[in-house]
Amino acid sequence: MAVNEAKLRALLSRLLYDLAAAQSAPLVLIGDRLGLYRAMAGSGPLTPADLALRAGLDESYVAEWLIGQAAAGYVTCNAEHGTFELPAEAVLALADETSPHFIPGAFQIAAGLVPATEAVASAFRTGGGVSPAAYGPDLWEGMDRASRVRARASLVPNWLPSLDGVTARLESGAPVADVGCGRGVALIVLANAYPRSRFAGFDPDGASIEHARAGQPQRIAVAANNHNARALNHGNDPGRIVHCAEYRAAMSVMNSR
């Protein structure tokens, strides 16, 4: 088999780039989870000691983390003064959870996929599905955080107006079902924007449904499946709503067959 050396080098370069990104991802999760990005936001140049004090963490670990973040290009480094700074652009992407550019939730999704590797490999052999329980908790929290960013920024002002007649119908009142609703982020955004409509959400992950129930407005009914859905509040029967729904949505869902 003839090998094109230039193509081989390009492929290896791509693979090594992806490997470096994969190895850097846990450090992003650590920075998010421990509040390091938030502690750096708007604080100007900081030494590792400064940041460790702000975050209540060990200075030696913080110093290594900062070096890795600088190597990745996420923070800037002033080698002469031994300081690090989170640029304004990185604040929007890594520290400000209200920003439409906030991305750590997507890193959580990637981390949550890893525990299911063996279950997915087994499904390749058998043709079966993969239980939601096979995935790590980061998957569900990450999907919630990532979808919250998109839903708040784009669902009502951008996505729905691109669908002919949908906005007007929701304003006048319509039954809506979200299949694979997760923690109910999109449903809550829609319910707040369209108070005359009724909403039902379904998801196979029971923990996600509990989160949705805790944060839902009164006009939302949620259930852990759509086969034996029962009324959860104010007489709303999610099973009935999904069958008569004018609009059925599936946003940011995973196909587990």
Image (cartoon, rainbow, N blue to C red):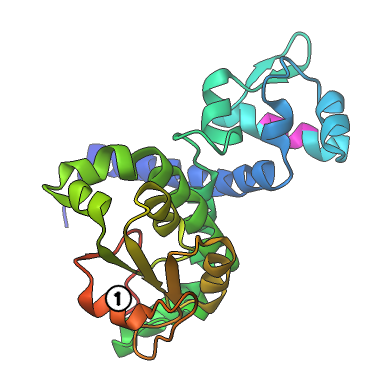
Magenta span has 64? yes
Q: Which residue does the image show at 73% across and 15% down from the upper left? A: 45
| Quarter containing the N terminus | bottom left
Give the magenta range.
63-67
Of residues 77 and 182, which is closer to you in this image?
A: 182
> Residue 201: horizontal and vertical position, in percent?
39, 70
**Element under label 1?**
helix
Magenta span has 181? no
Judge left or right: residue 138 versus residue 256.
right
Q: Which residue does the image show at 74% across and 45% down from the upper left? A: 34
Q: As displayed, is residue 94 above or below residue 2?
A: above
**Mark 1 packing: few (<14 Cα in 10 Å), some, or many (20+)?**
many
Of residues 139 and 198, which is closer to you in this image?
A: 198
Q: As displayed, is residue 23 above or below residue 78?
A: below
Q: Look at mark 1 in the image and give the residue it sits on.
A: 241
- Residue type at mark 1 is Ile
Q: Is residue 33 visible?
A: yes
> Residue 9: horizontal and vertical position, in percent?
32, 39
Q: Quadrant of residue 100?
A: top left
Of residues 207 and 11, which is closer to you in this image?
A: 207
Q: As displayed, is residue 160 above or below residue 237?
A: above
Q: Which residue does the image show at 58% across and 27% down from the upper left? A: 91
Judge left or right: residue 51 versus residue 195.
right
Q: Which residue does the image show at 21% across and 76% down from the upper left? A: 244
Q: Is residue 249 visible?
A: no
